[in-house]
Every structure is written in structure tokens, then in C-alpha cells.
Amino acid sequence: MYKHILFATDLTEDTEYLLEKVRTMRSFTGAKLSLIHVVEPLPGYSYAYLGIEDIEGQLLTEARQSIEKLGGKLNVGSGDQYIEVGPTKTKILKTAEDIGVDLIICGSHGRHGLSLLLGSTANAILHGAKCDVLTVRLPEEQ
């Protein structure tokens, strides 16, 4: 049975849909739960166009606030909440290995055409993880 679950979240409105799945898996297994959100770094040239000096800092602050709220909903303490900056797949997989999880839970949108060819974060995690991965299909937008 699973002992440590990592919930990889993009902190969007889809997170609410995933919460029940995460809660159910956690109660079924009795596993410890950790949360991760990755902020993708912005290319250097974007700062000039956006006119905001510390946009990455602002994104990190917002991410910390959002993951703290999520931690409250899932009863996950701040020591088990991770905010990383970098390539999403790499940071999720490294954190999963570093903290010794045996299951990663993430959401996945159905992909078609070019998006399917290029892959997705969930697909990258699935094929790169050294542990089990549960991808939850998110509802299609109407």
C-alpha cells in the first residue's frame, strides 16, 4: 500500500476537482500527503515587455499563498508543501525522489492533435517517474 503521496498541482480551478480524488486515495491508504507546485521561469526578455521588475517573485508569493490554502483544505503542514522554480516535469520528479514518495497524483486534460504529439506534463511525469503515477482525467470544458 502507498505510504507517501505527492499531489502535483497547477493551482488552477481544476484543483478543486482533484481534491476529492486526493482525499479518497489518502483515506484509502492512510498515506502521508505532500503538495508541490512548480513555477516555470519566465524568459529574460519577457520582463522588458511586461514592465514588472519582480514578476517571478510575485508568482512565487501567489503560489505560496495558494498552496497554503490548499494545505489547509487537505490538512498538509507547511513542511510538506513545496514550491519550486524550473521545468515542471524535472522539479516534480526530483522532489518525488528526494522526499521518497511512492505515488504521484496529477491531473490530465484529454489532448488531441498537436498537443498530444508534443505531450503534456502528466505524460512526462508518467514516463519519467520511478514510482507509481495516478493521472486523473479532468472534465472537458464545455
Image (cartoon, grey):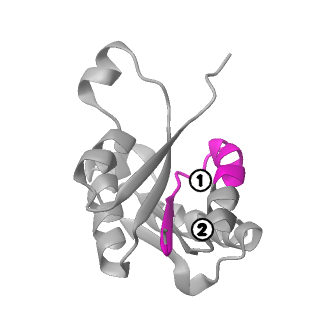
Q: Residue at x 28, y 69 (%)?
A: 94
Q: Residue at x 71, y 48 (%)?
A: 16
Image: 105 above or below 81 = above
Q: Residue at x 32, y 22 (%)?
A: 116
Image: 115 above or below 66 = above
Seen from the viewer's position, the closer of residues 60 and 97 is 97
The C terminus, quarter of image? top right
Q: For the image shown, how many numbered marks are present on the structure?
A: 2
Residue 29 is marked as 2
Q: Residue at x 37, y 56 (%)?
A: 132
Amino acid type assigned to the residue bearing label 1 in the image: Leu
Task: Say if residue 53 shows up in the picture.
Answer: no
Residue 11 is marked as 1
Q: Is the residue marked by circle 1 packed among few (<14), some (14-19), or many (20+) residues within 10 Å?
A: some
Q: Position of residue 84 (x, y in %)?
A: 40, 69
Q: Is the residue marked by circle 2 packed among few (<14), some (14-19), or many (20+) residues within 10 Å?
A: few
Tell me which numbered mark, 1 or 2, is placed earlier along the sequence. Answer: 1
Q: Secondary structure at mark 1?
A: loop
Q: Position of residue 90 (x, y in %)?
A: 26, 59
Q: Secondary structure at mark 2?
A: helix
**Span shown in magenta:** 3-21
Residue 138 is marked as none
Circle nearer the viewer, 1 or 2: 2
